[in-house]
Image (spheres, coloured by chain):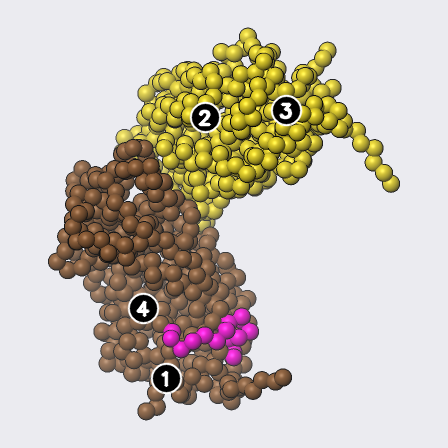
Chain colours: A yellow, B brown
Amino acid sequence: MFFVGCNAHSKDVIDQIIVDEAKLLINRGLNSNIGFEIVESLTTEVGPRLAGTEAEKRARDWGEKKFKELEFSNIRSEPFSVDHWERRHEHVQIISPFPQNLVVTTLGGSVSTPTGGLSGDIVSFPTLQALKDAPLSGLEGKVVFVDEYMTRTQGGSGYGIAVKKRSGAANEAGKRGAIAALIRSVGTDHHRFAHTGQMTYEKDIKKVPVAALSAPDADQLQRALERGDVKVKLSLHVEAKGKVESGNVIAEIPGLTDEIVLIGAHLDSWDLGTGAIDDGAGIGITVGAAKLIMDLNKVPKRTIRVVMFGSEEVGLVGARAYAEKYKSSLHKHIVGAESDFGAGRIWKFDTNFAPEKLYLGDAIHKILEPLGIGRGDNNASGGPDIGPIRELGVPAVTLKQNGWDYFDYHHTADDTLDKIDPSDMAQNVAAYAAFTWIVANLDDDFRSTE
Amino acid sequence: MFFVGCNAHSKDVIDQIIVDEAKLLINRGLNSNIGFEIVESLTTEVGPRLAGTEAEKRARDWGEKKFKELEFSNIRSEPFSVDHWERRHEHVQIISPFPQNLVVTTLGGSVSTPTGGLSGDIVSFPTLQALKDAPLSGLEGKVVFVDEYMTRTQGGSGYGIAVKKRSGAANEAGKRGAIAALIRSVGTDHHRFAHTGQMTYEKDIKKVPVAALSAPDADQLQRALERGDVKVKLSLHVEAKGKVESGNVIAEIPGLTDEIVLIGAHLDSWDLGTGAIDDGAGIGITVGAAKLIMDLNKVPKRTIRVVMFGSEEVGLVGARAYAEKYKSSLHKHIVGAESDFGAGRIWKFDTNFAPEKLYLGDAIHKILEPLGIGRGDNNASGGPDIGPIRELGVPAVTLKQNGWDYFDYHHTADDTLDKIDPSDMAQNVAAYAAFTWIVANLDDDFRSTE
């Protein structure tokens, strides 16, 4: 038995000097702590940095300062506006039959409860679909509880399913006359942390407030419901000031051409934790990788642009602003890759290239393979903030991280620096540095030649 | 090579019928879910039950009802008074140089901060001893931070060392003119949960408020301090109403004599979690074990008394009330054993017997050995609530549980039912049932014959 290799050898496709430099970058990345140092700096010196807040402004200042300190070029902050929203107070309790407090967090975008709170009997649905299947009336005065579980998967596919209830619960509850909604947190842990995240109301429906319960509290509510009717009281107070300023922070390693290799991460975080895995890690990985490239003291063929996107968490607002601002030069964007799935090791290399350019992906992958990275598929999203430019034709790469425990911490108070393993960060930095350097020095691109 | 066994065979010391019944109880215990069902009931139907509160009263009502439902005899609630203390509000933040909130919990017994809170620069000490070694002045206007770590050990010995700062930090800070104290939580986890617990002021010193930071927040404060001066603001608001009612809930399986075999656990919990591992588990284990014994439908030689102690967490108040109330009959207490170290498997059998009665401990141990229980030492405390009667001469046994992860959850909001493995509970119930049945039917006791 024998195999016929279909993949080109890297050295046939990628200049041997570049291959050697990429290997040097991998070696330096694995032996560098720069990625961890950057996320340590961001999470300590700024901490939580919710979109549109003064804290996010401090994060942009930090970003510009960090880029300067690391001697990047063309550093700038590019402002855009975002809808303000901040939680002020949240308190939910079972008032009968077993009085006790429940750990909750109001979902981003939710309206407040009326002054003095609201109370009502719980009507529980095992899934969002079960709520959708319920008649369009009959929940008047009730508090809907969507107790849908999320499945743990390495790649995060469980999230795509479970997250639908984050908007869906309040929307479907409101349509049916309910006064509020509660959901089991979109998460995989079993600690007493509620997971926040953005929800969006559909147009022209009754807006009801919505909060997420931690998994143990969802269990507790479930057990109470097994014993009979349960009445809860919700006091959720949020503030929404209208449009406020946010921004993307951008820096470059200028190349010989104006073609752009874009890597980045998002700078904003949810308000509960310090945004270490989401997405301080991505900032550390991509900025750290670019810094290692700068330290080669060589001018790449293409310009390497590092983007710290603002206001990702509240709806990719910075990514959309970027796509709009650069729409006339997107054809010069060779590839986009965002690191936004925690700090776990990269285990596969996904591309979103024209079919006839997949051999380039295979060749790049060969360089990354010694890092324990497999060749993935050609359906790469590139990361959330790459979405808007990918949809406009920019090829994308996802250096897919191990997300096995990502949703244990995601959008909780527990997303803090101690959840990051510096050696995992180093593997990410090594991979990003090598990948970015190779693409910045290729002759070809990943678009269709037709 | 051969071994000479020094231990008596169980059958020589313990009547074979009792040995067989103990083995039957072990078998039934391992196949029963009663222990878990009891803690499920308590944590769901009562939830948090802080000493001296209305919730602890509901727990006593639950206890009496549960004993009745299980058909125990001589059920009663025995009241005593306890100092009231409840947290109302707690908020701590770094105000400069990196403004952000810190996750804290006020320690039980702490005074409030002044209205409007207080703020001051942090002075950090790596250990309580380092604070004690500091001069008796020089901390005026400062907030002391005792950043001492706790070591994870299976037996919990790390706690005894680390817990000293819980009272010590505020006392030593106050003596030195500081305005408040913060400690790294007494715990072994790395989640964003602060661990509460009782602190006591020394007499005639300045009482300063004290709170515990979660481990990630202590890390964060440490990192901020590495960069320079850090100013914090504390708003800790507690209420203390003076003396209020608490109580022990007691039930019995009457024996042929008025000799008492006492097993029990404490009914109160801290206010943050639902008190599943501390100490709903102990309630489930000991009540469940006694129920299995009742189901034998045999009258034991000695009376088996099950005690749900009140107000343990705030200073063994129920245990002291018990010792006082029963001081004239303590000589008839054959042994005391409390389950109060979580829900992990029992791994050793410690005694506190007269030396000449150790052969009885060895014989009992032989029955328990198939449960994976080793013979421990003769320094058993019997559990916190056994302390007061042990000090008055009552022999004690500790069925020592695996406490490897106990201090990950201890006194936090995360002490909830999902942290308990029902099969571990069953092993505990099996061991308690067998142990209790044997001792209740022995001819001899564990006191010195001199």
Q: Position of residue A96 (x, y in %)?
A: 34, 46
- Chain letter belonging to callout 2: A
User: Identity of the amino acid at label 1?
Assistant: Ala
Q: Which residues are magenta?
A: B366-380
**Picture residue at 67% right of the left edge, 31% below the top:** A367
Q: Residue furthest front?
A: A297
* Contact? badges 1 and 3 (CB < 8 Å): no
Crowding at label 2, few (<14), some or many (≥20) Cα neighbours within 10 Å? some
Q: Residue furthest left?
A: B204
Identify the secondary structure beneath mark 1. loop
**Picture residue at 34% right of the left edge, 69% below the top:** B307
Say which residue label 3 marks.
A438
Say which residue label 1 marks.
B354
Say which residue label 2 marks.
A70
Say which residue label 4 marks.
B385
User: Eyeballing the image, is B101 above or below B401?
Assistant: above
